[in-house]
Image (tube, grey):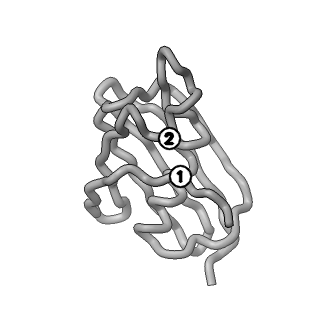
Amino acid sequence: MAFMMSLPTALRRSSGSEDVFLFTVEPDHLAFQGHFPDDPILPGVIQVDWAIRFGAEAFGPLGDFKGLSNLKFMGVTRPLEPLELGVAYDRESGRLEFRLDGPSGRKSSGTVLFDSAP
């Protein structure tokens, strides 16, 4: 059985074509362990993983993962920082667009590509 890191508890709201998840990540969350002990930041791979998992929560099965496009990391994300993750999914093209924003601006954004879900 594969280990899956827990998602932070989030408040969800829908605004037309985008679902938005509002959350903070506690300092003791597993995502910060080892990255980095004296100056913790949220790893980019975790940001992408959470975009996919919150996307599946919002839109149901997304299909089989095909790749990433336009992936950008623009700011450091720290414990207890208020975050807003926006996700939008186009089922026909299999494209999940995401953006992660904090008080100081955009943290990351990108497109996750999937084969069409059944």
Disc 1 designates what residue? 5
- Asked where in the image residue 106 lies, by quadrant, the reply is top left
User: Residue 103 occupies which quadrant of the picture?
Assistant: top left
Percent x, y for residue 82? Answer: 29, 36
Residue 40 left/right relative to 25: right
Q: Residue at x 59, y 74 (%)?
A: 92
Near mark 1 (Cα within 10 A), the count class, few <14, some 14-19 or many ≥20, is few
Q: Counting other residues with Cα less than 10 Å from the Cα at mark 2, is it few (<14), some (14-19), or many (20 or more)? A: few
Q: Amino acid at mark 1?
A: Met
The answer to whether residue 52 is above or below residue 103 is below
Q: Is residue 29 above or below residue 16?
A: above
Give the mark nearer the N terminus: 1 vs 2: 1
The alpha-carbon separation of the residues under discs 1 and 2 comes to 7 Å
- Tell me, yes or no, whether the two marked residues, 1 and 2, touch with CB atoms within 8 Å: yes
Q: Secondary structure at mark 1?
A: loop
Residue pointed to by mark 2: 30
Viewer-side residue, 50 vs 40: 40
Decide which of 40, 110 is in the foreground and name it.
Answer: 40
Residue 4 at x, y percent in the picture: 57, 57
Query: How far across and down, in percent of the image, does residue 71 sit?
Result: 61, 40
